[in-house]
Image (tube, rainbow, N blue to C red):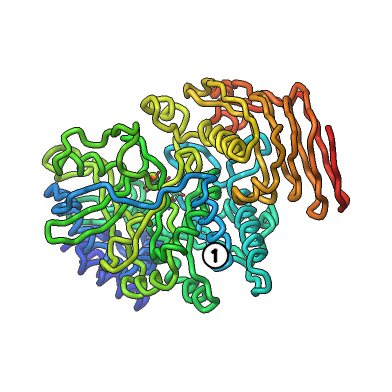
């Protein structure tokens, strides 16, 4: 009563739109928001800010606040009742396409995939703050490895550019379009992402080729009645929190981009996450799988260690016959298994891995069916709520909560006829995210991936070393070292630019001879496009660069003191944060640097 009285007294301050909003708030049980509003004349500016915020919360959510609160009430009631979202479903292990780098099938899919890249749009979800990592900058600005210092965003953009170039080369004569690249940002990341792009000339992309879509936060809920939570310090501000990466679907839909892409003849939308230096090694082959198997949805997966913080791809079969292959998020897999006759829950099987493939949240959707589905749903993804209750009565929350959604839940609303599949790659090939801070990473169970800056970087060297091995180079075994309390394998620091190779076929073409070798302490950096390695023996550091029109054949023997990986103290505040979160730095003692700035053919015997 007092709330609506307070509101009524303030009516004269409100525009007709604001009056509508106020009425709507009362109708959906949000009268408490006006409870302590003073008479007109006091805080009038703040009251205007309040309505501006509510209008934004209302317009940025499909169906507006009415729909948000309605869903919130339902989900909060389910949560209170302890209802299992997978009630009635039995999990089993699905079968998918398994790829092994370098074998015939892999090469075949890679080739098919490269052809399709020109028909793809790439979408990076990068609105997350990275709370678990605790890094102060945006995650896409972090160096993917510190041998060259290339940041994630640069690597992603160069990979997309080089892949699309390779795609046109394979299908000569067809028109060349600029492959679209969308980045979903949030208030936490938007300005800094734009700044990173602008200060680096978009890393070689055309600014028109890159679109930033900013997701808005959603309103927080204070209690089981879905009453909106206000800022404890300012009653005119509603608390907000991120809604999750699932927002990407409604944003793409409402932006009109999907239609534009369809009209331009595109066929695929590829989604990926902010920090995974390995991802592009698997993208061509995975896209090849999508094209060959005509998958509407293809999720990339890697073998998963039990309890690893990655979702498990699971086949769910309902008692009523419904079936779906879907990600079960890492916090839900164990309870689901326990509730359905697997008393040990989320455990490894005889392979040493969980039988459920690990979702790396790299999704390839076929554009046509994707648009059709979104036309039905408006891009709304099934949400969930995860309140932390004060006690077992579940009547009060420890802090406010909100609805969330995940992009990989997209297939949940698909009809049974939809072609949903997944593709599993080698564990070392496709996934090494940077998510955990050093303290938490050091606590990860032995044998499980750390998902830290330390493991993210060392995984790049491991993967490149393994790939060169497959291409016939003799690569020394790694040594085990401990940085920031994590035991990691240190392989030779081999890094190449996407210009040099975006597929395994590229690597094979550029490496020849039976006698190439790289010792464990070595660093090899290949920047030039047409650098051919033939019978090169490396024990130290070699950096090769060349202009695009130069072809440089490199062989012979290089020996120098090279670049050393050195331990640093993560608490040494005189070092940059990017270095401290790794626990090591590269000490560049000595190197051989070769650079070819004029077009031509060169044969170098070092
Ligand atoms: O609101 C958000 C939240 C997150 N994100 C982005 O979404 C991506 C993933 O976010 P997180 O790192 O928090 O995701 P999580 O680690 O919790 O799990 C995610 O990745 C691993 C998979 O196995 C999981 O199934 C998937 O949910 C990041 O690129 C992040 O920037 C948004 O763009 N908006
Ligand atoms: Mg998260």
Total marks shown come to: 1
Q: Quadrant of residue 116?
A: bottom right
The 10 Å Cα crowd at callout 1, few under 14, some 14 to 19, many 20 or more, is many
Relative placement, left or right, of 482 versus 516 is left
Q: Quadrant of residue 365?
A: bottom left
- Residue denoted by label 1: 116
Mark 1 Cβ and ligand 1 under 8 Å apart = no
Q: Position of residue 89 (x, y in %)?
A: 17, 53
Residue 57 visible: yes
Q: Position of residue 482 (x, y in %)?
A: 52, 20
Q: Quadrant of the N terminus?
A: bottom left
Q: Residue at x 19, y 55 (%)?
A: 317
Q: Nearer the viewer, residue 236 or 445?
A: 445
Q: Residue at x 36, y 60 (%)?
A: 42
Q: Residue at x 52, y 58 (%)?
A: 183
Relative placement, left or right, of 401 versus 322 is right
Residue 44 visible: no
Relative placement, left or right, of 455 versus 468 is left
Q: Residue at x 35, y 54 (%)?
A: 406
Q: Position of residue 281 (x, y in %)?
A: 55, 48
Q: Is residue 387 above or below residue 263?
A: above
Q: Position of residue 125 (x, y in %)?
A: 47, 55
Q: Quadrant of the C terminus?
A: top right
What kind of element bears circle 1? helix
């Amino acid at each position: 009563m007092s709330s609506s009285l307070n509101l009524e007294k303030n009516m004269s301050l409100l525009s007709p739109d604001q009056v509508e909003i106020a009425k709507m708030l009362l109708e959906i049980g949000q009268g408490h928001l006006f409870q302590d509003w003073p008479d007109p004349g006091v805080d009038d500016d703040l009251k205007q800010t309040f309505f501006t915020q509510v209008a934004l919360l209302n317009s940025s959510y499909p169906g507006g606040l009415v729909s948000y609160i309605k869903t919130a009430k339902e989900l909060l009631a389910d949560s209170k009742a302890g209802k299992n979202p997978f009630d009635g479903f039995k999990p089993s292990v699905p079968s998918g396409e398994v790829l092994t780098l370098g074998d015939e099938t892999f090469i075949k899919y890679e080739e098919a995939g490269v052809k399709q890249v020109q028909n793809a749009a790439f979408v990076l979800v990068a609105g997350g703050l990275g709370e678990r990592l605790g890094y102060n900058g945006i995650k896409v600005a972090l160096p993917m490895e510190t041998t060259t210092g290339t940041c994630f965003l640069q690597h992603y953009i160069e990979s997309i550019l080089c892949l699309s170039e390779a795609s046109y080369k394979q299908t000569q004569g067809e028109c060349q379009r600029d492959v679209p690249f969308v980045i979903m940002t949030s208030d936490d990341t938007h300005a800094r992402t734009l700044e990173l792009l602008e200060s680096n000339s978009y890393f070689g992309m055309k600014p028109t080729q890159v679109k930033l879509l900013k997701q808005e936060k959603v309103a927080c809920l204070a209690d089981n009645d879905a009453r909106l939570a206000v800022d404890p310090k300012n009653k005119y501000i509603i608390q907000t929190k991120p809604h999750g990466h699932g927002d990407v679907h409604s944003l793409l839909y409402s932006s009109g981009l999907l239609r534009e892409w369809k009209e331009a003849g595109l066929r695929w939308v590829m989604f990926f996450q902010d920090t995974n230096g390995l991802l592009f090694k698997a993208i061509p082959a995975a896209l090849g799988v999508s094209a060959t198997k005509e998958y509407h949805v293809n999720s990339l997966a890697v073998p998963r260690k039990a309890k690893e913080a990655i979702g498990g791809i699971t086949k769910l079969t309902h008692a009523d016959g419904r079936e779906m292959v879907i990600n079960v998020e890492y916090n839900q897999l164990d309870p689901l298994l326990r509730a359905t006759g697997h008393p040990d829950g989320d455990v490894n099987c005889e392979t040493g891995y969980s039988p459920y493939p690990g979702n790396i949240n790299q999704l390839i959707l076929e554009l046509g069916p994707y648009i059709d589905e979104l036309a039905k749903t408006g891009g709304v993804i099934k949400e969930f709520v995860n309140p932390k209750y004060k006690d077992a009565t579940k009547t009060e929350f420890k802090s406010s909560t909100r609805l969330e959604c995940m992009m990989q839940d997209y297939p949940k609303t698909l009809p049974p006829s939809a072609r949903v599949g997944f593709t599993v790659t080698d564990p070392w090939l496709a996934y090494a995210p940077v998510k955990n801070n050093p303290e938490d990473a050091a606590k990860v169970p032995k044998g499980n991936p750390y998902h830290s800056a330390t493991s993210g970087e060392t995984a790049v060297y491991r993967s490149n070393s393994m790939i060169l091995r497959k291409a016939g180079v003799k690569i020394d075994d790694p040594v085990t070292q401990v940085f920031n309390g994590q035991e990691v394998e240190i392989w030779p620091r081999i890094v190449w630019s996407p210009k040099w190779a975006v597929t395994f076929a590229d690597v094979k073409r550029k490496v020849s001879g039976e006698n190439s070798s790289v010792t464990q302490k070595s660093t090899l950096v290949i920047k030039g496009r047409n650098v051919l390695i033939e019978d090169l023996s490396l024990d130290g550091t070699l950096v090769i660069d060349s202009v695009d029109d130069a072809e440089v054949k490199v062989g012979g023997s290089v020996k120098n003191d090279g670049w050393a990986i050195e331990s640093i103290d993560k608490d040494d505040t005189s070092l940059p944060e990017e270095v401290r979160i790794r626990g090591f730095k590269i000490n560049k003692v000595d190197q051989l640097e070769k650079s070819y700035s004029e077009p031509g053919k060169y044969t170098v015997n070092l």
